[in-house]
Amino acid sequence: MGSMMVNEKLFDELGARIKEVLANSPVRDIEKNMRAMLAATFARLDLVTREEFDVQSEVLARTREKLVQLEARLAELEKGGRTG
């Protein structure tokens, strides 16, 4: 994965753009303008690829399954400890 370095200038610029959008837009245009602005901002960030995201999602799903199994096993052990 690439570095997720985001400089402060980008966020300052983003904040200024948001203020500009809010100051100059009729309410019905705000969402459209915000989406366009955010899409442009995200395009400049170092974001993960779809493939990397899918790999991490798969790892997370497997980790979650293991956690559920461990919780079930722990519950069984605790139940056995109380009855014995």
Image (cartoon, grey):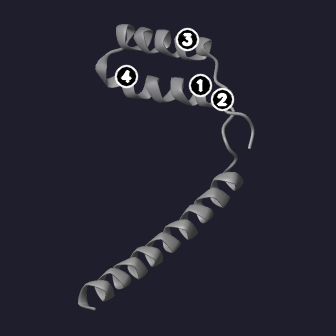
Q: What is the spatial separation of the Cα atoms under label 1 and label 2, in whole angstroms?
A: 7 Å
What's the distance in space between the residues labelled 2 and 4, CA to CA? 22 Å
Query: Percent position (x, y) of residue 11?
Result: 54, 17
Write down the quadrant of residue 59 in the picture. bottom right
Q: Quadrant of residue 83?
A: bottom left
Single out the mark in the foreground, 1 or 2.
2
Residue 42 in the image: x percent, y percent? 60, 30
Label 3: element kind? helix
Secondary structure under badge 2? Answer: loop
Question: Residue most toward the left?
Answer: 83
Q: Nearer the viewer, residue 34 or 7?
A: 7
Disc 4 residue type?
Answer: Ile
Q: Which residue is at the front of the view, 21 or 83?
A: 83
Most extreme residue toward the front, as rendered?
Answer: 84
Identify residue for label 3.
13
Residue sitting at x 49%, y 67%:
64
Amino acid type, mark 1:
Thr
State the count of labels. 4
Tags 4 and 1 touching, CB below 8 Å: no
Are the residues tagged 1 and 2 within 8 Å (C-beta)?
yes
Label 4 crowd bin: few (<14), some (14–19), many (20+), radius 10 Å: some
